Image (tube, helix red, strand yellow):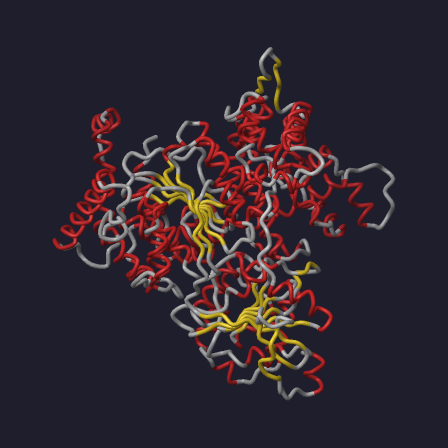
Amino acid sequence: MLDGNEDNRRMHNPSVRRSMSDHLKRTMLSNAAAPFRVSRSVVLQEAVVSEEINVALLAMESVSSQSTDLGPFFGLPTKVKDLLHNLKGIKSLYDWQETCLNLECVQQRRNLIYSLPTSGGKTLVAEILILKELLCRKKDCLLILPYVSLVQEKVRGLASFGLELNFMVEEYAGSKGKFPPVKRRTSQCLYIATIEKAHSLVNSLIETNRLDNIGLVVVDELHMLGDGSRGAIIEMTIAKLLYISKTTQIIGMSATLGNIKDIQTFLKAENYTNDFRPVQLKEYVKLKDAIYEVDPKEEECFRLSRPLNYKYSSGMQKVDPDHIIALVTEVIPSHSCLVFCPTKKNCENVASMICKYLKENYLRHREAEKSTLLCELRDSGNGNMCPVLRRTVPFGIAYHHSGLTTEERKLVEEAYSRGVLCLLTCTSTLAAGINLPARRVILRSPFVATEFLKRSQYKQMVGRAGRAGIDSEGESILILQEKERKMATSLVCAPMETCYSNLMYEDGKGVLSLILSLIGLNITTSLEQLKDFLSGTLLSVQEGQLCVKKSLWDFALECVEVLKEKGLITAKHDAQDVTLQVTRLGKATYKGSVDLTYSGMLYSDLSKGLEGLLLNSYLHLVYLVTPYDLISQCKPEWMVFLRQFTMLSASEQKMSAAVGVPESFVARKAAGQTVRKNVNMLVVTRMYLAMVLFSLLKETNLWIVAEKFQMSRGFVQTLLTSASAFCSCVLHFTEELEEFWPYKVLLSELTRRLAYCVQAELIPLMEVAGVMESRAKQLYNAGYKTLSHLANADPSVLSKTISNLYKKQANQIVAAAKIMCLSFADASE
């Protein structure tokens, strides 16, 4: 224990405080959870690494820009090469990776786009460049990924590198991430962020004049520039980086693009393209009773490969006219297979159908591990389990789509990666998300729901075929009906689609949002500056194709008028130009990343809420943070609504009536009566969704709540995740508006509750990347009750103590916990 005087000395002596954090850092790095005692040789090795970094740093300052040899391993210490081998199993780089890393533009830190087919090894190049920036140039880095699951996977994977090489790894996804980020005393930081969070992070760095701290930004899946509102956000982020920081290097990774020149012009980047794949891919289509190989040289693009001679009974022929069972049994269970289906329901039906006709020997393949997986799935659902998975998992088969909970998806993915599951029936989102390769990929149909596949979607799906280091080749089979033959020819043989700016998406919502944030961040305070900025966007590069009715500048001037009408900006005219300023509401809107469609509505709802804020229940607050954009995806079940409504307290029912949903209305709808009174159905549906969330906070069992409200558990999980993220947005929105001061404290706690929706004692463990609810319970019950307990765990002991926790997972969890502890210690504020 410290006495009071000692405490005071440390509070007023920064060097003492620093030495404490340094001591904590040294202690944790050397022996906190090491499975062996730290020897003298290890200490010497650390000294060598440190010396190598210094040598590399000096080399970067003194060697001419033409030189490509800045150190032992692409300008990095040898330890990086050893870590790649030990942690990722990478012994050497592919030729193209070496070529790319040695490009003159890379050495001179110019912007670069490099594009290769799926599974070509793009990520490793980016990771080496990130490490170089962190260790040698001592600058922070930002890695932008499209999905939360990918961010979490990358945080887990790179935490061990951070520990070994002394840099921080921070997650910016969902409700996670601090704006502006915490300042560090000694360490550089790698921010790993989703598209939306990366934009907010860049905004916060611009506002605090810290953007130059970011030395490198890597954008994965750069072709998503052409993907709706998310593409617009990527474009805004890149355009701001290009305009403001002349020292930040931007690297874009992508599948092959049809109009790479446009993207190059926008990014002011060079381009490196290679068609390398570590495993050869053969593409086929199935038509009637034959398999054809895709060959662009053939007149009709297809060349007969083999006839199908499957002996189906008449019953099987009716159930499976496309011969999916025969096609999958050619490869499973000894090899893996993915079957892409057009809808979620089709995924489940196809998985069930295949199992009906498999022989009993499939049940015996890795039987014990499949039994363990079933137990894990049951535990993740608190005793509940999907009946389809209960039937299919024993055969080594599962489905994968957004209807699964996050925990179920993670368990299914891990089991498939280990070969416990040999076949997944899945929707197209799997191809764009986590990396799950297969020996054979089957496309059940050339449609996603009712939409015909895009060329880029098709390439992403078939690109999952072929597992490097496991298979000598991969193959894809697209199942076609005769009427789809002509359309499919362009799908499999045509050049890649072009990638267009999405700032004009939904009548130019992106341009509106961009202009608001530019004015709010003082990037452009006049029309002249605004014009200059817009000339550096991808939309400007493609103005000829996208701005047909009016020029980009004319449209921008219209947007300025719209923002004035909405009360988000003001314009002051003088002799020379127009001075643009953001209003308080405008600032709250862009800082909260609130969609302009809902900004006024949110302000109105929060204002009304203050008139009679219900504080003895979470219901009112939950209603205020229920996402507007999910309302259209839900239709209330009126009897369920009434049953749940009657279970509310008197004050909760009164609050519901105050926002526009009285009990009388719900009762009449449940009775099937016509309601003459004019009631806003958007408000009604939002209250219904709020009651689902409210029930979740009390119950914390997602399965029970889903059953209670007759919703899919996947939708309930999506609602919870979206509400958590939106709650974080509303919190930032209210922080900018003085009149909403009561919400600040209330919403910060609610954001945390919604982010995890578990018993309070499990939350600290679930903040560690990769720890879900069922795993947190296991850890807590085994005595690992806090973050520091977990950070000080021995991975070897942990994997033996916790059932079904593999050594690699244990290492990643402990490393992620250590990084979080070190991050707190290294914070300078």
* In the image, farthest residue toward the top: 575
On the image, the x and y values in percent for residue 453 come to 64, 60
> Closer to the camera, 211 or 455?
455
- Quadrant showing the C terminus: top left
Q: Is residue 413 left or right of residue 667?
A: left
Q: Is residue 516 left or right of residue 472?
A: right
**Extreme residue in the left direction:** 40
Q: How many marks?
A: 0
Residue 296, picture quadrant: bottom right
Residue drawn at x 62%, y 77% is 324
Seen in the picture, residue 422 relative to 270 is either above or below; the reply is below
Q: Is residue 390 visible?
A: no
Return the residue nearer the eye: 780 or 649: 780
**Residue drawn at (68%, 88%) of the image:** 313
Quarter of the image holding residue 186? Answer: top left
Q: Position of residue 257 (x, y in %)?
A: 53, 53
| Image quarter (top left, top right, bottom left or bottom right) of the N terminus | top left
**In the displayed structure, does residue 451 sit left or right of residue 501?**
right
Residue 385 image point, x, y percent: 57, 65
Up/down of 307 relative to 440, above or below:
below
In this view of the protein, can residue 9 be seen by the observer?
yes
332 up-or-down from 783: above or below: below
Percent x, y of residue 663: 76, 41
Q: Is residue 459 left or right of residue 70?
A: right
